Amino acid sequence: MRLLVRFLGFLFAAGTVVFLVGVAAVAGAIWHFSKDLPDYSQLQDYEPPVMTRVHAADGALLGEYSKERRLYLPIQAVPKLVINAFLAAEDKNFYEHGGIDYQGMARAAILYAQNYGSNRRPQGASTITQQVAKNFLLTNEVSFARKIKEALLAMRIERAYSKDRILELYLNEIYLGLGAYGIAAASLVYFDKSVNELTIAEASYLASLPKAPAALHPVRNRDRAIERRNYVIDRLLENGWIKQADADKARKDPLNVTSRSNGAHIFAGEYFAEEVRRDIFERYGEKKLYEGGLSVRTTLDPKIQVMARKTMVAGLVNYDEAQGWRGALHKLDISGDWGVKLADVKSLSDISPWRMAVVLETSDQSARIGFQPGRELGGAVSKERQTGIITMDGVRWAKTKGKAPTAVSQVLQPGDVIYADPLVTKDGAAVEGQYRLRQLPEVSGAMVAMDPWTGRVLAMVGGFSFDQSQFNRATQAYRQPGSSFKPIVYSSALDNGYTPSTTVIDAPIEIDQGQGAGVWRPENYSTGKYYGPTTLRNALQRSLNTVTVRLAQDIGMPLVGEYAKRFGVYDELPNYLSYALGAGETTVMRMVTAYSMFANGGRRVKPTLIDRIQDRYGHTIFKHDTRECRGCDAPGGWKSQPEPQLVDRREQVLDPMTAYQITEMMEGVVQRGTATVVKEVGKPIAGKTGTTNDEKDVWFVGFSPDLAVGVYMGYDKPRNLGRTATGGHVAAPIARDFLKLALADKPPTPFKVPAGIKLIRVDAKTGMRAGPGDGGNTILEAFKPGTAPPENYSVIGVADADGRGPAPGPQPSQSGGQPDGGFFMRPGTGGLY
């Protein structure tokens, strides 16, 4: 008995020693691993990298920019279904344990012992809290040391933060594949839905991904992905979080994913979105753009953008097709599976409804074509093959060496890689199964549409295809504006004492350029045709060059340069007379901005693509509209106080009466001058065409009372567009087609007459006051007080036509302009000069 007592005492003592040693060992281990643990308090102020989202003016998503596709979602905004799906998949006892699941650890230890030496990766037993500790504070190293640190951190995190805060961090940080971090981004990437729209099957699939997103790819590993998704559905049912009928239905649901692009999400908005991205990058830097979670509300009007894109592309294509067929893009071996071979050819993704195709067989009457197949989410080529027919109606435009084809086989041969789109009849109906041959235009161009009162850019087209060329010709291409610059010259004259009825001699002129540079002889566009004494209105309508040169010579190029700078067309304009004809280089955006100041009564506007920028917390950090609104806050609600007033402190760059005069003169350009094609819009439109030397660039810039638009067309490497290619014949029709669409629902509002302007009936040709018996060749002309034409005129004298330029040195190449050109009958003097 004593021996037994001694033995039991020994065992007790030994057990006590072992226990104390174990406690000491555990304490030592805890101390050892705790001394260099990361500071978990940083989770309190955690700001994950969040994508910047760019929206159109109507709220539609335009683009997303990020290095990690993540949208931070507060736990209160996460649906209960989604929370339960992740708890079922990862940690069903999350709200009960203190950070560590001891039963799970025991299971993992047993499995580790069973698999020891098999080189299998040990199974984890991490709770959601432990995963937060690992993802935020530790590495992915597979070791006992990391697991111990993970457990210690998890217990500390549980004591410091609420369960909801821990779950919020987890659901926003986890990587779920396809570049998506967090449930909000993953929901968009996989299903193009917000989290509150997810079905049971979709939420269960997302919840299955944290452990191995690549191994559960919805296309490459579809069967395994469905199996894991169904496992999560079963756990939801087992935990009583869904009903049996819902579980049965969810298991049968197909795993359909929707590929979501990283680029612009509004058709035709690629150039606009990229310009906004560059703007944000310049303002705030790369980190803020890709990680700052900015919310950007842009000025883009999606409807107007589609109109601009449609009409600009049609203009480019129509001009290009008139030049004839240049041949197939590539030659392809069509033996075997032509679809796989064609799928490897790079096609443009933003020119719908055009599609790449390969010619499979041809005859005199038709060609059978096969369309490029798409690719599945995993990258595999789709097995679907679509074909169509191109008949003579689809190739009739394709002239070769100036001759129209008489057979389809003259244009297309088997193996030719081409573009085609549905063939439509004259009334716009598609012909089933038939397609039209298309050709990527060599010529390019740009269009900008702007609100002239605010400078908000409503639409921008920077070229035929952003996928083909990211060079934005609306903002980055500096080209000669030609005669579309002349309204700047005329407005500077009108602002300094001249009137629309001031008479100038349209006749040949020679300018001695000095220093052995020779004599410059500017000519009107219609060479050899001159009109003699001509009013400024008629000179602008006919775009007479010699009148413009004489006018610039009389007022001085320094003054013209000052106005060009005021309007933002040029930063500095050299004092050469040829620059009065648009020989300098500028952009479409600058020209449309300048014309907007004519339209709004001479107020400075700054072009903008962004209305407002908010940070990740919703605080506004940028706002374009800086006008003061007095009374807009209305504390205490509406109490019959005076209406709110907008205080506009923007600079007045041009007298409002001058702005109206030049507007009326440019309305005459549309009604009776070089832009008469725009009359078809049927609304009040003012504008000016432009054509440069050798027809390398053609322009039209114009505006209605509430919409300004500019169109430019030319080759990226400047070359002649053809003798008949003028601003009036090529650019103006594009603007006409756009304005017809954009103003279709707008009433025909006339331009507002500013206070002080006198409207006097004058002879349209001479500018003299119209008498009671004058016929129909009279117009209402706008005059400032004291500048109305006298009752009669006397010719005092005509100066020698050999005028000299204001500055020595060679004249840059004359930028021709449409027909534009003298000596003056100064206001109030009654004489010709």
Image (spheres, helix red, strand yellow):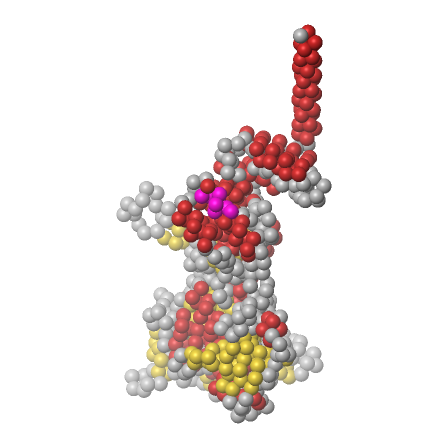
> Which of these two is toward me, 620 or 505?
620
* Residue 237 drawn above or below residue 688: above
* Residue 470 drawn above or below residue 118: below
Residue at screen point 54% across, 41% down: 90
Q: Is residue 723 visible?
A: no
Q: Which residue is most to the front?
A: 1
> Which of these two is toward me, 521 or 690?
690
Residue at screen point 50% across, 82% down: 389
- Residue 699 x, y percent position in the rendering: 52, 76
Residue at screen point 62% across, 76% down: 336
Determine if the magenta segment contains residue 675. Answer: no
- Residue 527 x, y percent position in the rendering: 54, 88
- Residue 391 x, y percent position in the rendering: 49, 86
- Residue 641 x, y percent position in the rendering: 29, 47
Q: Main secondary structure of the magenta part?
A: helix
Q: What span is colored magenta in the figure? A: 231-237
